Amino acid sequence: MKEKYFAYAKKIADQYHINYEENVSQAVSRAIEIKNNSPLANLVYLAMVDALQYQVSGDIDYARRSKKALLDLGCNKKAFEEMSDFNNQFSFKVMDYMFMPNVYIRTYIMLKESGVFTEEEHHTIAQNVEEAIEPIFAFPEWGSHNRAVVRAMNLLLASKYFPDNRHSSKWKKMGEYLMEESFGKWTIEDGSTYHPVWLNAIFVYEENCERKDLFDSPMIKYYAEFFSHMLPPSGIYPEFGDGRYGTVWGLYVSCLERLAAIYQNGHYKYAAEKMFSVLSELDPGTAPLTLKMAHSFVEAYLWADDTVLPLKPDYKSEEALCDTIGKKIIFRSGVNENDTYLLLNYRDETATNRLGQYYLRNTIPVHSEKTHHGHSDENSICHYEHNGIVMLHDGGYRWRLFRDGEWRADYFHNSVVVRRGRFMENQPFFTYLNDGGDYKRTRTEKVYFSNFSHLDVSRTRNHILDYQTIWDRSICYFKRERIFLIVDTMGVTSDGSFMYSPIFFGGNCEKLDENSYLTNYDFIGSDEFVTKIPNKGGKLHIRYIGNSFKTGTETVGRSYTEETALYRFANQDMFTGAHTYFVTLLCPDDCMNDRIDAKITYQEDDGISICVTSSESEYHLCFKSKDELGKRNSINRPTYSYDRSKVSYDTMETDSVFSFVEKGNENSFGLLAGTRLDFESKTLFSAPEGMFMQNDYSWDSVASLWIKWEDTF
């Protein structure tokens, strides 16, 4: 793989150099127009590739080419003499203080002893570095996120490789302070674009600092597993939070290679190689964001250990990372291209690094994001693919700086939107929803996630604090049928008038009837890279179960293109303790047949039951909506009992929070957190009684909840 990374990086650089003078001239014109040198950023990234080519080949021409790019980066200096930013404190005459200095410095160090620099040029490089680093002190942004560690990395490299600079000790000190919250710790970010930026910067910092205990941290090991397990069968990392589908993949590859080498883990190597093999074919290396990532393939080359053999994992449905930090659930049939994969994100702002979150919230004017780089995507289906076809995806990062609230908002995700007051149909639906995109304060938690023989199930809870709403999203994945049932349960903490709407987005959309739609995507858009989805003609059936609510469609700008929003809405007068339910069936067209059907068989405030039929089986599913333990008795232990906690559904009676009965070739049942399950007046399961100590220290015989049971009947 090292040679493949080298060849790909070389291709990127060589393509740019074919029209080097023209590319630089256009970038200079643009830089003068916008009054900073960022349009010339590609020069520094490509310079690192040429520096690597020099080191590998020994050809001094590559060193000269790399040096020229480093010096051309500052060719606008004189043009910027009268231009300044940040209240005239400084100007970006050569480079920004974020993503360019570390690559600039490392490239220079790779060339320093080559003999291609004159003394004057050495001095110029040192001066350019100082002018890039000093502005950090005007805004030394801190917290466990990418913008802090990138600053820290730049400060460390400048202090280490330019020790004679009068500011060197100050640079080193500030770098250590900014890295303190991230080195071997959790990140507060929830954006698929920025996780690898954050981790990559930490890796570069570790390579160049005196501390060598980073990889002893269990958190770094967790992120290694996180990256590996999150990769879909397509090999293209899913979007969540701020992300662009198919971008920054080079950073994922370089991080995974470093992790594979450190931990000697074949699963990480497999993920890196699969991602590279897919995206290096889709991306010819000319996309703007790929040019900016050229250095990541240098890092992949330098970090890769090809003695570690790729090991194909056998991942199935699971929780990603954990329900405290990661807060994501993956449903999947496997890792092959034709497998099914669905990602649910229920991460809120999460109670980590509270001071850093407070600082960000009160410093940057981004009202639409949860700190940091996260969207209002709690309980959202961020990505769904089947047979190599993307069925559902997230909405992109932002189109332009001043539109960044749009796609972060709660109404641009495959989730449920809540508003106070009624939606009147004499206006566009998204006009009614649009509130500027301000982030809604939420608190999320996992209620349960479990694997059964023929289905996997999750229930995650979103306390939408700004709207006094408790929204539970339950997902059932039927493994043999490869279809999904989504049950959204809406409750409130205070009486009021609410509008609820589950929304799903599609590219092309065909209405089949009042409750059924057929959608598919030709491609997923990006402002810097367009990935053509290998669509084999597959489409997704979205069927709303039950016909008591109206549905509609609307064309909206989303993910750098136009997409179709499918919505269902309910205007509800809600009272504390009451519940409203939305049930949706997601079925790829190759899994759809006349036998696939679903119907609601019971829905009251205490729960809902649904019958799902297929050519394989008939499933009876019960979802309890009340408190998990039901009405409790504070005197006795346990405080619960079957009689106080049971719900009598259509054909089932149980006190469990979730239960199912499958009738087919093999009759089976399962439950979570229950003491008994009756089906068609027959008891399928009953927990034996055990002795419990009471408040007065006497003993009583009572049945205890079993966390889980599955069996046949």
Image (tube, grey):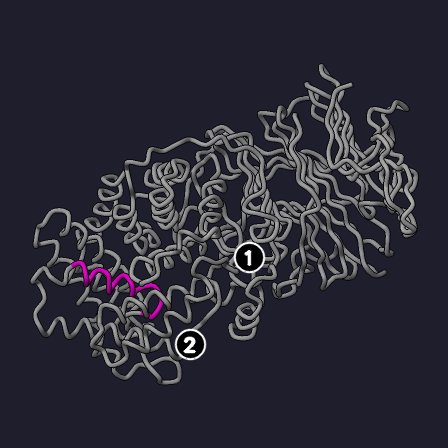
Q: Which residue is mark 1?
A: 407
Q: Are marks 2 and 1 in contact (CB under 8 Å)?
A: no
Closer to us: 344 or 402: 344
Q: In the picture provided, is 269 more to the left or to the right than 49?
A: right
Q: Which quarter of the image is occupied by the N terminus? A: top left
Residue 434 in view of the camera:
yes
The overriding secondary structure of the stretch rendered in magenta is: helix
Q: Which quarter of the image is occupied by the C terminus? A: top right
Q: Is residue 322 magenta?
A: no
Range drawn in magenta:
96-110
Q: Of label 2 and label 1, which has the lower sequence position? A: 2
Q: Which residue is mark 2?
A: 139
Closer to us: 212 or 425: 212
Within 10 Å of disc 1 (Cα), the crowding (few <14, some 14-19, many 20+) is many
Closer to us: 107 or 277: 107
Q: Residue at x 59, y 30 (%)?
A: 588
Q: Is residue 101 magenta?
A: yes
Q: Position of residue 553 (x, y in %)?
A: 65, 46
Q: Position of residue 445 (x, y in %)?
A: 67, 51
Of labels 2 and 1, the one closer to you: 2
Q: In the picture provided, is 559 more to the left or to the right than 44?
A: right
The amino acid on which the numbered mark 1 sits, given as a three-letter code, is: Trp
